[in-house]
Amino acid sequence: MKIVVGLSGGVDSSVAAYLLQQQGHEVVALFMRNWNDASVTLEDECPWIEDSNDALLVAQKLGIPFQVIDMSELYKERIVDYMFAEYEKGRTPNPDVLCNREVKFDVFMKTALSLGADKVATGHYARVSSTVDENGQEIYHLLAGKDNNKDQSYFLCQLSQEQLSKALFPIGELTKPEVREIAKEIGLVTADKKDSQGLCFIGKVSLPTFLQQQLEPKQGEIVEIFADNDLYNVDLPQFSSKAEELEYLSKPLRYTKADGKVIGQHPGAHYFTVGQSKGLGIGGHKESCFLIYRDMETNTVFVGEGRNHPGLYRSVIKIDNTEVHWVREDLKLKDGENVEVEARIRYRQPLEKATLHQFENGLFIEFDRPQSAIAEGQFAAWYDGEELLGSGVIG
């Protein structure tokens, strides 16, 4: 097969290319240039230059064709502008999930296929397999990577059956140490290179600095809500249906200045996210203070002391029906149906037992245990064992 590898300049995609070559495939390397603004990165220069040089050295070492494609305009339009818009609304986007859906496995994949590729490969720690159903239709399964510490299936949670049918993840069966060992054995320049940090393809950035490029500072008050507040001891109302109960429980508590005590100032509620503790500039507490709610209309940030503050936790999240995505379309729930799954709301979070409920007014995820720091705009993904079944944007 002719396979195009998205060579990022890191060790994972380098070894992915090598493994495919060893399997006898015709391998072509493409490097995506997605960012060209060094003003917000924490490195001395824009990281894509070093990454593209490393990718070129790997391609030369393996003796495979190499090409750089400039996708910075598309990336700005589909990822960066989306991020700014979401933060401005008081939501918390995940650019890495979007990058995979909108860039790597959309425009990049279409570019690769137009070059005559049969498949597209990346260095993700994930796996894809397929089975044939009773109608003779091939069904693709997105599986977690074998390395539990590096599993990146969450970042691929928005992929479709069509995208998975063309995707390969050659290192999905390996652990990170095994990948580095292979790279060392064959003398790849990326063998000891540190994993990239920060936003997808931008590098390690100062998020407030990044957001301040587009979002104007707007000073507001920080209000502390104490853990013994009466708001946390209110009896639940009587519900006429399960859908009504889930709708009620999915809504975050809304606070006013009268519910707590003003303890400081902040430069803009849109620079922060639920669960954040760093950057708030709050002192004089035994434990760290965590952001529990943002009122975007009044530009007020509400915080609570300690990781166990009741304001940080919620058991139910709602996903608008327009934001629900089933990787396994054949398992899509009908109105009134429910199913037990395991779910997570952020990368690296351990999977938690939960029940999906599909109703006319949305899909609800009811967790067995309350979850910390649920923020609008995050992606929730649900699994059956190792298989990722679907995902959606938290409303």
Image: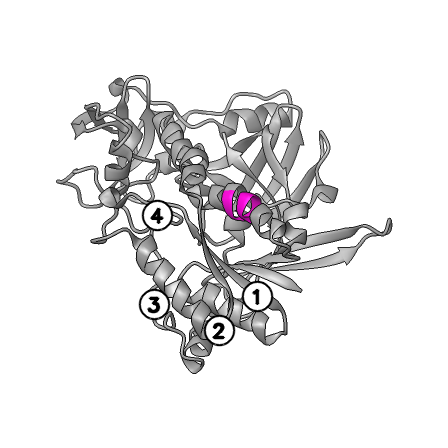
Q: For the residues marked 1 and 4, what is the alpha-carbon distance in whole angstroms?
A: 26 Å
* 354 sits to left or right of 196: right
Residue visible at 68% across and 52% down in the picture: 165
Q: Can you identify the residue that label 1 sits on?
A: 27
Question: Residue 157: in sight, yes or no?
Answer: no
Nearer the camera: disc 2 or disc 4: 2
Nearer the camera: disc 3 or disc 1: 1
Q: Quadrant of the N terminus?
A: bottom right
Q: For the residues marked 3 and 1, what is the alpha-carbon distance in whole angstroms?
A: 23 Å
Q: For the residues marked 3 and 4, what is the alpha-carbon distance in whole angstroms?
A: 17 Å
Please tell me which of labels 2 and 1 falls first in the chain: 1
Label 1 SS: strand
Identity, as a three-letter code, of the amino acid under mark 2: Leu
**Crowdedness near tag 3: few (<14), some (14–19) or many (≥20) residues, C-alpha within 10 Å:** some
* 357 sits to left or right of 212: right
Q: Is residue 105 magenta?
A: yes
Identity, as a three-letter code, of the amino acid under mark 1: Val
Label 2 SS: helix
Please tell me which of labels 3 and 1 falls first in the chain: 1
Residue visible at 57% across and 72% down in the picture: 21
Q: For the residues marked 2 and 1, what is the alpha-carbon distance in whole angstroms?
A: 10 Å
Q: Can you identify the residue that label 4 sits on?
A: 202
Q: Can you identify the residue that label 3 sits on?
A: 193
Circles 2, 1 touching at the beta carbon (< 8 Å)? yes
Question: Residue 237: in sight, yes or no?
Answer: yes
Which numbered marker is on residue 62?
Answer: 2
**Crowdedness near tag 1: few (<14), some (14–19) or many (≥20) residues, C-alpha within 10 Å:** many
